[in-house]
Image: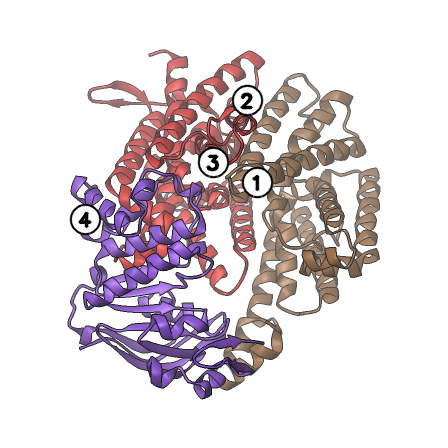
Chain colours: A red, B brown, C purple
Amino acid sequence: MSYTAWILITGSLVGISCGLVGVLLILRKMAMMADAISHTVLLGIVSAYLISSSLDGGSMLIGAMLAGLLTAWLVQWFESTGIHSDAAIGVVFTTLFAIGVILISTSVGNVHLDVNHALMGEISFIPWNTVDVPIAGSIPQATLLLMIITLLVIVVIALFYKEWKVTTFDPALAASLGIPVLLMHYVFMTLVSVTTVAAFDAVGAIMVVAMLITPAAAANLWTDKLITMFILSAAFGAFASCVGYGLAIWLDTSISGSMAFATGILFAISYLFGPKHGQLSKWFYKPGEI
Amino acid sequence: MVGVMSNLRQQGLMSDAISHAALPGVILAFLLTGEKQLAVLIIGAGISGLIAAFFIYGIEQSTRIKRDAAMGIILSVFFGGGIMLLSIANRTGGGSQSGLDSFIFGQAASMVRSDTYVMGGLALLVMVLVFLFYKQWKVVLFDPQHANMMGIHAHLFSSLYTFLLVLVIVIGIQAVGVILMAALLIIPALSARYWTHSLFFLFLLSGFFGGFAGGVGTLISSSESNLPTGPFIVVTSSSLFLISMIFGVKKGLIPIKRLSRGTTVLSERTSGGEGK
Amino acid sequence: MTALTVKNLSSAYQKKIVLDSLTFSIEEGTLTGVVGPNGAGKSTMIKAILGLQPKMTGSIEFFNGKLKKLTNHLGYVPQRGAVDWDFPTNVLDVVTMGLYGQIGWFQYPGKKHRQLAFEALEKVNMAEYANRQISQLSGGQQQRVFLARALVQDADLYFMDEPFAGVDAKTEKTIIAVLKELKSKGKTVLVVHHDLQTVPAYFDHVLLLNKQLIAYGPTNETFTKSFLKKTYGGEIHWMGSDQFVESL
């Protein structure tokens, strides 16, 4: 397969996995948690690197998962001492991120890890770094990882679809029905962290936030059905990656930056033209008529 | 180093969003003027920060999307745009030498003397604004509706607040960088909360903590070459935060533990302490 | 049989005591109004009983500890403000959520479940709204959706947090009808209630709460001037026969 095709596939996979996770994120009002985790994952990756001194997918995923869970747990703990959740998130992620950056710039130094790469990602290198898979042949490593993660995300969301729905909509009811709300919370946080790591290589930490939140928010403006929202969000994510890539080629600029920017354009369009909650449709129908 | 920049409190992560969103402004200002004049860059950052703040409020008010998602959208999209512009700037030449990269992580050491004057001036302006309208801030922060009834324009003040927030952020950006700016706004104010209940001392202490962290952080990072300033400042201020949290006189964990042995003492304490 | 036994229950919110060692037990088949001033810990009590809020001390026993798996036997109707009504889902779906505990892991609700949910909606006069987006409901309609969801759960013990707050007359009537039906089926119901005037008409038992348990018992014995005065601390004006007005 050609170079461009791999990039488009990788980008779309990022869009799909993030789009799906993102729906739950914004419905659970945890959008900023994604921002936090996308930053703290850096610490996880650096620590994993320091311990195992390799940069393979496995140890990176575990490191990131632990960092994600640590973030979620710390934020919850700070909240329980009476700190506002906004502030709790702010304290936790900036501190962990700062430690991560310091570790990189002191001990790891010039080795493979570099902060700019982690933050901005470099999708254009992905097709060069391939592995051989039995049936499919030679596949870029990052793409393979993303495929697995996307599959995992789809399976976890589909299997526990009704549990996600009820714990998100009404955690109190869920608890009284015997659904382990807290466990679901941590499973979800793990899902966010793993998705973040997988998407990391391609679009970088900050663009992950764009991919997680923006397509889902845009989808929220188009539909009133949860399942449609999932599908739309994934489609938006994939579409934005492709558009972003085109944009980057055209302007000869950062691919990940353009992808994030493309999600923004998509959101702006949804904001204006969304059939149910777009601004223009509000002019045509008076409230209450819908 | 600028000290008293973290005085404004509440709305924690808004500062994170605005500081990320300031990036495209910085780069755009650079691209338009073609030189790295701090004042110009700050104006650029200020403008894009204000636009971002405006968008966030706009999205929150006109759609079903909640504030946190709105912040996430604006933050990442603006930052993405900033990165796009940054790589264009780097390509067109001169960009990489001009140290625009340092806006992301901050490099206090790379600042020139004139930069410090600009920042110092702005910091002074912030302090003056805070203390000049101290009375009004108190009411507006505590109870906006009541403030309206008293004839203070809460709306005006929340605009002024946003303006101040943006101002503080653009001052700090070059020192600690876009990403960790939020830490300097949130953490010192939060630490101060453990020591005092009075708004006045809160302002003072928070400013002091911020300044202290800034100073120590810069000192550590300049002790060896090539260490980024921002992260060290943040880690210093978080250590202060932990100390405050454990030992803080007013709300710290240890003093409370000592008291909570008897339920009666505890309820007395809380009823006297916070008033509600 | 006692439906609920609470022993020495205490709970705190950020180091502030909200519930102070409550002890009481509630008989099966009773309709209890939980009454007390703002901040008396009424909602907290329900949440602590259901395990939604950490308790500092105390033990809770349902049906003399005879039920092994409690999950399908407890129904909870939260305050309307407790959920996000912008959530992308429709009325029937929300009611179906009441059945999720019975459906089991990995399975999706089927036709049978939707039928049950629809029947519950009919009981609260909301059948015509089944496919309506929940963000388009009025306050009263939202409350009736919650009620239908509780009905469909077919629990033995119900907890309702201020179902009557800010609803229209039609909804109020529906709620009363539902409460009566639950009682006639031998269910036990605890309702957090604000409107003192309607207490004697709606409930057969009253639980007076102000951080501590003031009194619990049959309405005619417990809902008296002296106990109310103790509950509200300040002034309660006795308004003739059996009417009260709360004043601060």
Nearer the viewer's eye, disc 3 or disc 2?
3
Q: Secondary structure at mark 4?
A: helix
- Residue indicated by mark 4: C103
Task: Find out whether the residues at labels 3 and 2 contact each other: C-beta distance under 8 Å.
Answer: no
At x 37%, y 11%, the residue is: A2
Q: Which of these two is toward me, C220 or B271?
A: C220
Q: Which residue is mark 2?
A: A254
On the question of residue B178 being in view, the answer is no
> On screen, A178 above or below C10?
above
Q: Report in which chain the residue with disc 2 lies.
A: A
Counting from the top left corner in percent of width and height, residue A192 is at: 39, 41
Discs 4 and 2 lie in a common subunit: no
User: Does the CB distance between marks 1 and 2 fall below 8 Å?
Assistant: no
Q: Which residue is mark 3?
A: A213
Query: Is disc 2 on the same chain as disc 1?
Result: no
The CA span between labels 4 and 2 is: 49 Å
